[in-house]
Amino acid sequence: MSEPAIVIDAKRVSDLLDRLPAGEASALPEALRAAQAAFRHVPREVAAAVARRLSVPASRVFGLATFHGEFSLFPKGEVVLKVCTGAACHGRGAPTLLDELLSKLGIASGGTTKDLKFTVETTNCVGACAMAPVVSVNGELRGNAEPSAMAKELLGGRS
Amino acid sequence: MKLDGREAFSRAGEAARGRDAGRTVVRVCRGGGCRGGAAVAAAIESTAREAGTVLAVRSAGCHGCCDLGPVVTVPAAGLFLAGVKPADAPEIVTKVIGAGEVPDRLAVKDAATKKRFAREAEIPFLAGQTRIGLRNAGRIDPADLDDAIAAGTYGAAAKALTTMTPEQVIAVIEASGLRGRGGAGFSTGLKWRACREATGDDRFAVANGTVLLEIDPHAVLEGLLIAAYAVGAHEGFVFARADSARAVALVKGAIETATARGLLGERILGTDFSFTVRLALGGSEFVCGESTAVLRAIEGLVPEPRVKYPRSAERGLFGRPTVLDNSETLALVPVVVARGPEEFRKVGTAESPGTKVLNLGGRVRQGGLFEVPFGTTLRTLVFGLGGGVAGKRRFKAAMVGGPSGGILGEADLDTPLDYGPLAARGAIVGSGNVMVMDDHSCPVDVARYFTHSLAAESCGKCVPCREGLHHLAEILTRITLGEGTPADLPRLRALARVVADASLCGLGKTAPNVVLSTLDRFEAEYRAHVEDRKCPGGVCRALTKFEIDTDLCEGCQACQKVCPTGAISGAKKQPHRIDPEICTACGMCRTKCKFDAITVV
Ligand SMILES: Cc1cc2nc3c(=O)[nH]c(=O)nc-3n(C[C@H](O)[C@H](O)[C@H](O)COP(=O)(O)O)c2cc1C
Ligand code: SF4
């Protein structure tokens, strides 16, 4: 099986750039979020184009893109699972849950499966401590379950 | 339509309050945690239609107890139903709404006494709170401006803008003694005054912190508007975590609707005052919430904190005077303005008037958001409101103040939750998170875990935090692996002090709390790790050996079923045995044993 690739078509890039206020450096986070949403990563050529559009050095674009966990220079999976590692979740099985997800998928924390289906990351307290352990599934919160049962449910039939 | 004055505003309030006249209102929560609220609402609606019952089914924001969700309330009757499923709809329509009878299974079971309550005013963990910042939690639909207006939101802003000078507003906030709820507890009034008096043509007002935004976004916006009026800002931002999809959507909608109604934007409520609010999104990293990092993020820069001088009040966002307040602080501002500083001071302590929203979690029976007066003891929080430690376990410690908070032990249970008393014991108010640990936990492992994760959170700008936290985590990891030495303990202490003293921002300054506070309280357990190579809590695997106490074991085989390595043997009703050669000390069996028969040797 060949590895899936994410197509960076020129139209989507130019749409993305057109929506940014030219020369407005403070729009950089918004630009990166748009790129991440469109391509599940910030492709090199998009980073360079954003730098030109906003009149900021490319180093600043990469600086921000590599600072935040929400951005990535490599494609993330279709499903991004973020395991909350806040205090309450830690006390209610988050480490077990994280371990199970990672070992079932055979990746390290922050990693993505080869077929680009799943990415597993950790995140800080999402404020839903009463339903610990909490996982954000593409932004939607799930919780209130036994760690191993949750791992199974989150990964569907996959093991 | 734009509200062009105080009179139009009060008419809008009456209209909003009157819109459900003659109908019974039922609220179904759609908080982030309550999956299934939509299905419950639809089921109640269709059942009522078939039965010919006239209802107004409305959404509610998070009540702060997501483990009980989805929650359905009937406000007029004061009823509060927990764990509702779509199949409960017929009973809700006929029995609950029709006859005021609540089936036992939908009533809230009190965690401590096991008694069931359906009246909100009688549910101990709700009735025991003083909800001021959370006054509308679960009582309004956070996506509905009319709900907010009906609840009185924007009334204090209307009062301030039309009857008070900015100076008077600042004087009221100062007199109330309101302290920032974002962690440091700085005087809000002083901060506003500094910003107002700073030289500069224009200023900014910024709201920081996400939790309240999901519950009551208009209360935060109203507070921000009052802050802006007080300091003279005409532009502002609400800064929220980009990954909180719900908060982001709610704030976006709230800004739009409030602007459309003339409660934000140009010439607010027909006055000369204009204030435009925009939403700014930030990362989920811990440091992103630090005040100077927030301002840098809004400017599009990497959110690394900067030194506090010049202060943001003088030179903040884009170099202009800026006031930045936590969203809980802002949600309290309208209450201070509406009811006056004396009233606000009636709860809480002299140094810290008012209440604080705490997020209780960990090994406690009832977790969630608890708003209590400053000065409430840790004991009242954990054993009163929280119903005590979950299962049959004993209280061992509580981490107070969030990921960089301090660990308090049993001897600290009577500590008043307030800035001064907590600081004196090595903890902080911080984010208001309180995590309870039972006797199956290990303070050394907790210190290792949080130091390790905070080391990863360090933005790397300053050396004590960036290098110091890694080194602390390394020493702690060694200790939990059984490779520590007694000399590690003074080393930890010394290094932790350096990190706390020499770091640039609050992250590095508070990160060592967990190390220092566990060393202070649980030194014996540290010693057991480095001298006897034992983990008394039975957590650090390399140092733990489990045994089954044959006197306590009932032979139920529950442990055998969960043991991932098949280390446990024994026939039914016969005492079981753990084979130490196979056991990996994962502790799964201990979580399953109902008889406490699995002991650490
Ligand atoms: C590492 C770190 C993280 C912080 N995170 C937050 C946060 O998430 N929300 C918040 O309101 N304040 C946070 N703060 C506190 C802010 O720096 C700031 O003090 C606060 O928002 C000011 O508002 P207040 O005076 O109303 O408390 C954080 C501080 C530090 C040092
Ligand atoms: S203390 Fe840590 S988080 Fe704060 S500025 Fe220094 S390195 Fe960054």
Image (cartoon, helix red, strand yellow):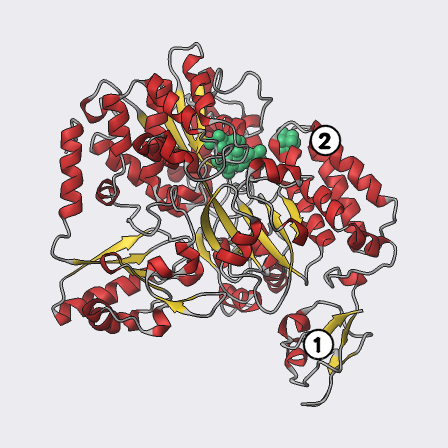
Name the secondary structure under disc 1: loop
User: In the rendering, which numbered label is found on residue B597?
Assistant: 1
Tell me residue B574's x, y (percent): 72, 89
Tell me residue A41's x, y (percent): 50, 43
Q: Chain of mark 1?
A: B
Is the distance from the Cβ of mark 1 to the nearest ligand 1 atom less than 8 Å? Answer: no
Is A21 rendered above or below residue B601?
Answer: above
Nearest the viewer among B113 and B402 is: B113
- Packing grade of label 2 (10 A; few <14, some 14-19, many >=20) is many
User: In the rendering, which numbered label is found on residue B464?
Assistant: 2
Tell me residue B523's x, y (percent): 79, 50
- Tell me the mark number nearer the camera, choosing from 1 and 2: 1
Identify which amino acid the numbered label 1 is placed on.
Answer: Ala
Left or right: B169 with respect to B304?
left
Q: CA distance from mark 1 to mark 2?
A: 45 Å
- Could one spot residue A18 in this view of the protein? no
- Could one spot residue A4 in this view of the protein? yes
Which quarter of the figure has residue B532? bottom right
